[in-house]
Amino acid sequence: MSTVVTSGGNAHRPVTLNPLAWRRWWLGIDRNDAVVAWAQTLPGQAAIHIALVAALFAMPYLRTSQVALMAVGLALCWAFPQRRLAVLAVTGLTYFLLRPFKIGPQYGYFEQLAAAAVPSGVPAALMLVPTGLVFLVFAFAMIQNQKHKYIAFVSNRPLLFMFMLGALLTAATAWLSHDNPLFAPIWIALAYLASTYFFLGYVLLDERSKTKAPLHMQMGFMRPFWAGFAPPMKGPAFYLKFQAQSDHDLAVSRLKGIKLAVWAAILFMIWDWGFNRLIYGYWGFPRLDDLIVATTSGEAASLGLRWAAVGIDFMRIVVLMGAAVHAIVAVVRVAGFCIPRGMVRPLASRTIAEFWGRYLFYFKEILVDFFFYPAFRRYFKNNPRLRMAFATFAAAFVGNVLFDFIHTMPSLAFEGGDRIWPGFLSYCVYAGLLTLGIIWSQQIQRPPKPEDGYVRYNVLPRIQVIVFFALLQVVDDSSAVVPIGERLTYLIGLFGVTL
Amino acid sequence: MNDEKLSHLRQSISDMLVNRGQPAEFADTESLFDSGRLDSMSAVNLLLELETAFDLDLSDPDFDISQIDTFAEIRQLVSAPA
């Protein structure tokens, strides 16, 4: 490789047109002294921030308002690097007060309920601020109880307590008439609790951490500015651990972030141009859901086409999820927290359990932190295999299903059970199959070893994992647009069985 | 006695790192789980070893896995009076 040494020191920047040499150089920028030094200069910092925001705007699955909020948060973290935690608190609280819910239609329903409480001409959305403040009082009380253990059951089982509260509120919204004066405050309380359950949950879990964050940062973590559509990615104590402690660390964190943002943009382009425009658009290849509906209603499709639709849909989703997760982690890293990646080469996994950890790391962490560890520490301590299987069931099935259900609880009131329950049932089937797969992987599958030979170590286990998750994708849908019965019929049909 | 057990525990963690394709060496204050070097399965194995070798009861509601993210924290946990 031809290289030159720049005036910055040991920056071996390729002068060749060989793209592989440029790729190597690009992947090493966070270890390149000259680039790290440049990233600490004002032009370097500006270039990184502008490039990141431009990359985010180029990904239409992020809403413009979300990107704008991230841009403001990043700009403030850039302007006040020593006050990064305060920036997180202020932006997080502002975000929470203005956009507290995770599901779009809940805003419309909130405004409908709040309209009765505000004078005509005043936007009902303004009521989000006082109701948000009331919920923050509840969050504050929960944190204080966690610190001081005023109510032992609530401090020992804060997540169970909040779930029971949510279930009670859900039952009340189902039981009360919508005209009842208690209905609106109960539904609003439920909507806040459901949208903030896992964010507040992490703050409460952090109270047990040795590096717990100050209270103002904990309150800001009800909705960090990067959260958007994403589930919480650990709690404030985790971010304290990965916070850049020097200008050098900050530059490295930002460079790692911009590398990830570029990779996210590439993945997004593959998803948009490769899958949507070329495969599904120009070539007219059928989308999986369309093919499921068509084949179950009697249209003919070859077995090869059915399998290909599954494989292509699986790859499309992996690429899209990769783009989304990398974009969010990129924002966090440029903000100054060099957290681990949210997805690390999932297709290289050799076991089902390994894929589960590599695919959506932070979602898996939620299930592990909130469900797996508590179950593992408490139950079946005298039977190691049962103990592991039960803890896995608690995370992969109970946790997975509850994660979906908790976010859906407020929607039951205005969408109705007929619309929600089929999707929930569908997700239960998905979570059940996933759980069986992981338990089989942990308890029965022998982890492949290098001495098994190249094919048995590098090829077959990976194919096995990819096929499992690709097939699982057929039933992974909580929208119920395509009923679970049709999905299962299609799944069985892939093996030549027709019902 | 604890030193011997801790030494064995350190070796177990090194083995877990190697099984995950990571370098076997790790500093006492280096993050093992939050950093992603070890996964939840490794954490489970570590919990089992802590329970059996040091007779710890980790079902205490105040216990959290983040309390044993580094070897220094593990040493502190097993050295603390019950």
Image (cartoon, rainbow, N blue to C red):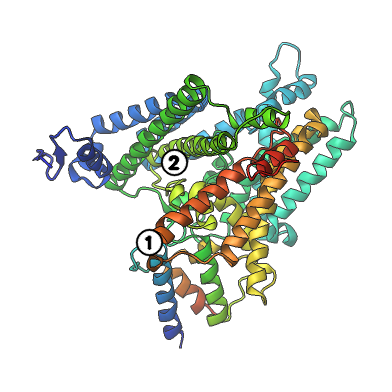
Q: Can I make out residue A213 in this image? A: no
Q: Nearer the viewer, residue A424 or A109?
A: A424
Distance, label 1 to label 2, CA atoms, is 23 Å
Q: Position of residue A331 (x, y in %)?
A: 42, 36
Q: Quadrant of the N terminus of chain A?
A: top left
Q: Position of residue A39 (x, y in %)?
A: 25, 37
Query: Dots 1 and 2: beta carbons under 8 Å?
Result: no
Q: Nearer the viewer, residue B71 or A60?
A: A60
Residue A423, compared with residue A366, is above or below; it is above
- Specify the amino acid type for callout 2: Val
Q: Quadrant of residue A450?
A: bottom left
Q: Nearer the viewer, residue A496 or A266?
A: A496
> Measuring 38% from the left and 61% from the top, which residue is drawn there?
B21
Q: Position of residue A399 (x, y in %)?
A: 66, 51
Q: Which residue is mark 1?
A: B21
> Measuring 73% from the left and 26% from the top, which residue is drawn there?
A110
Residue A488, compared with residue B70, is above or below; it is above
> Measuring 82% from the left and 45% from the top, which residue is drawn there?
A168
Classed neighbour count for the residue bearing mark 2: other residues with Cα under 10 Å, few (<14), some (14–19), many (≥20):
many
Per the rendering, the mark at residue A318 is: none
Q: Quadrant of the C terminus of chain A?
A: top right
Residue A414, compared with residue A162, is above or below; it is above
Q: Secondary structure at mark 1?
A: loop
**Horizontal side of residue A344 vs A426, given as left or right:** left
Q: Can I make out residue A67 in this image? A: yes
Per the rendering, the mark at residue A329 is: 2
> Measuring 42% from the left and 34% from the top, which residue is drawn there?
A267
Q: Position of residue A420 (x, y in %)?
A: 77, 35
- Specify the amino acid type for callout 1: Gly
Q: Secondary structure at mark 2?
A: helix
